[in-house]
Image (cartoon, rainbow, N blue to C red):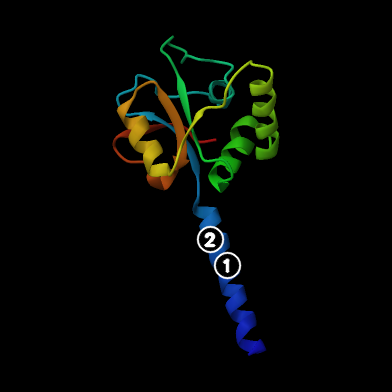
Amino acid sequence: MTSLFHPLALIGLMLSTLTVAQAQVVVIVSAKSPISTLSRQQVSNIFLGRAHSYPDGSPATPLDLQNGTSLRDEFSEKVHGIAASQLNAYWSRMVFTGKGNPPREAIPPEIAVKLTASNTQLISYVDRGWVDHSVKVILTP
C-alpha cells in the first residue's frame, strides 16, 4: 500500500501543478469596444475605483470575480501588486470611510464573459481559456 500511495501522490502533485501553470489571467472588454489595450496601472486604477473612464473618456465599469478564487488572487497580485487580503482591507477602508464600493462580482467566469461581451463599458478578467470571439484581451499581466 505504501509503495502504491507514493507514486499516486506524486502524480497528483504533478497534475495540480500542470493545472496551475496552464491558468493565465487576462483582462477583457467587449469585442465591440474601441479600447484595444490598457496598461497594468490603468487597469488597476479602474478596479480600485481611482478611475471611472477609459483613456478615450468613455465610462469604465469593472466586473470582478468572486472573492476567494485563485484567479482573483492572481489578478490582485499581478495587476495591483498586492495580496488578496490587502485588497480586501483596502475595500473595507473605502466602504467604511464612504469613499467607494468594490466592483460588482460575476460568478462564474462564463457569466463575466457574457456580461462583458454585451456591454462596452464593462472591463473584467478571466482565465485565457474562457476568451471567445465576443470579447478581446486588452492586457495579459
Q: Residue at x 64, y 27 (%)?
A: 91
Alpha-carbon distance for marks 2 and 1?
6 Å
**Is 112 located above or below residue 61 in the figure?**
below
Quadrant in the picture for the C terminus: top right
- SS class, disc 1: helix
- On the question of residue 116 being in view, the answer is yes
- Residue behind mark 1: 14
Q: Residue furthest top?
A: 57
Quadrant in the picture for the N terminus: bottom right
- Residue 21 placement (x, y as % from top left): 54, 54
- Residue 117 placement (x, y as % from top left): 32, 31
Q: Of the numbered discs in the image, which one, if any, rests on residue 18?
A: 2
**Is 141 located above or below residue 98 in the figure?**
below
Tell me if label 2 and label 1 are in contact, CB under 8 Å. Answer: yes
- Please tell me in which quadrant of the rendered image residue 80 appears: top right
Q: Residue at x 63, y 15 (%)?
A: 99
- On the question of residue 81 being in view, the answer is no
In the picture provided, is 101 more to the left or to the right than 125? right
Q: Amino acid at mark 2?
A: Leu
